[in-house]
């Protein structure tokens, strides 16, 4: 009996949509990062998947 994965999420697609560089590309994305920084979060480190 083999393991069945319902969804195989692409880490590349996820990073391109929600990643640091995608956030830095737009004005609104930079606002999001600054809000997270004010909250005290390290935003430019890669989070674990």
Image (cartoon, grey):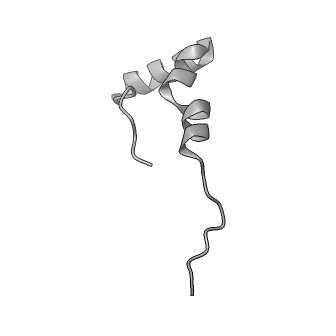
Q: Place residue 27 in its image quadrant.
A: top right
Task: Return the x and y of residue 13 as percentages of the image width and height.
Answer: 61, 39
Percent x, y of residue 34: 45, 18
In the rendered structure, the answer to whether residue 35 lies left or right of residue 44 reads right
Q: Which residue lies furthest to the top in this view?
A: 27
Based on the displayed image, in which of its 4 quarters is residue 31 positioned?
top right
Say left or right for 24 vs 6.
left
Classify residue 8 as left or right of residue 33.
right
Residue 28 vs 48, above or below: the answer is above
Seen from this angle, which residue lies furthest bottom?
Answer: 1
Which sits in the foreground, 44 or 15?
15
Name which residue lies at 61% across and 14% down.
26
Query: What is the residue that sits farthest to the right in this orientation?
Result: 6
Q: Where is residue 20 in the image (x, y as percent from the top left)?
A: 48, 26
Task: Reply above or below: 32 against 6.
Answer: above
Q: Residue drawn 56% across and 81% down?
A: 2
Q: Nearer the viewer, residue 36 or 1?
A: 1
Q: Quadrant of the N terminus?
A: bottom right
Can you tell which quarter of the image residue 5 is in?
A: bottom right
Q: In this view, does 6 lie above or below 11?
A: below
Residue at image point 39% right, 23% down: 37
Number of labelled discs? 0
Up-down: is 31 above or below 17?
Answer: above
């Amino acid at each position: 009996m083999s393991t069945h994965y319902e969804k195989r999420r692409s880490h590349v697609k996820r990073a391109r949509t929600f990643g640091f560089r995608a956030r830095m590309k737009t004005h609104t994305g930079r606002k999001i990062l600054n809000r997270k920084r004010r909250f005290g979060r390290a935003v430019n480190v890669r989070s674990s998947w």
